[in-house]
Image (tube, rainbow, N blue to C red):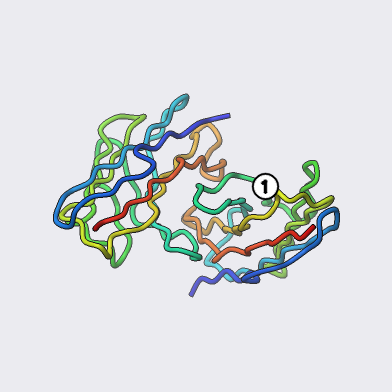
Amino acid sequence: GQNIDQPTEMTATEGAIVQINCTYQTSGFNGLFWYQQHAGEAPTFLSYNVLDGLEEKGRFSSFLSRSKGYSYLLLKELQMKDSASYLCAVSDSNYQLIWGAGTKLIIKP
Amino acid sequence: GAVVSQHPSRVICKSGTSVKIECRSLDFQATTMFWYRQFPKKSLMLMATSNEGSKATYEQGVEKDKFLINHASLTLSTLTVTSAHPEDSSFYICSARDEQGGETGELFFGEGSRLTVL
């Protein structure tokens, strides 16, 4: 079956760095997405990786290793507003998005 | 960037009534839109894929007669929850892909609609 695994919850300190991991087993691979979702709101797009390596976008970076079925989202210089859930999603061979359960990130002052 | 608008954002209804939720792509055309349901502290669950001018494709376990989807134009899809019951209370979210971005283009999400059935 298809499966996306990511930690349920993480806690970090304001100003610090946090890495949220995502591992996947899917039928085919057409890219991996990271979305941010604040409580009660719809998800917003953060990043897309289809090739191995690191993509940097401001304070956020996303890494992909297709051979390992692994990705991480790196958040630097954490701010209180970064408290949210972070969803990992993989586009499979049919371009269907398979969603992880999300990682709730709690930022403490 | 592309914007998807969803309406209403919140709706409260009595058990047995029907509720319609609209999803509009504001500055791009979308032959395909997606409808999700999200339970508290859970991930998005794809309910159906809405196809412009044809029938929606429902995921296994989703009742077609319960959740009616209509995609009458390239910018509008609607989800109607028929004869709603308290267990239908949930957060419903639509999304669409700007097709100029291809099959792996970014998905744009509506604001979501929180349905509460009394």
Residue that appears at 67% across and 68% down: A69
Lateral position of residue A59 relative to residue B2, left or right: right
The residue most toward the top is B27
Residue denoted by label 1: A47
- Figure quadrant of the C terminus of chain A: bottom right
Question: B54 and B8: which one is in front?
Answer: B8
Q: Is residue A42 above or below residue B45?
A: above
Q: Quadrant of residue B55?
A: top left
What amino acid type should be assigned to the residue bearing mark 1?
A: Ser
* Residue at point 78%, 54% (across, down): A75
Residue A107 picture location, percent across and down: 74, 59
Drawn side of residue B30 relative to residue A30, left or right:
left
Image spot of residue B20 (x, y percent): 24, 42
Q: Nearer the viewer, residue A13 or B83?
A: A13
Rendered image quadrant of residue B62:
bottom left
Q: Nearer the viewer, residue B39 or B44?
A: B39
The answer to whether residue B109 is above or below residue A34 is above
Pick whichever, B3 or A79, lies toward us.
Answer: A79
Residue at figure coordinates x 25%, y 36% from the top left: B53
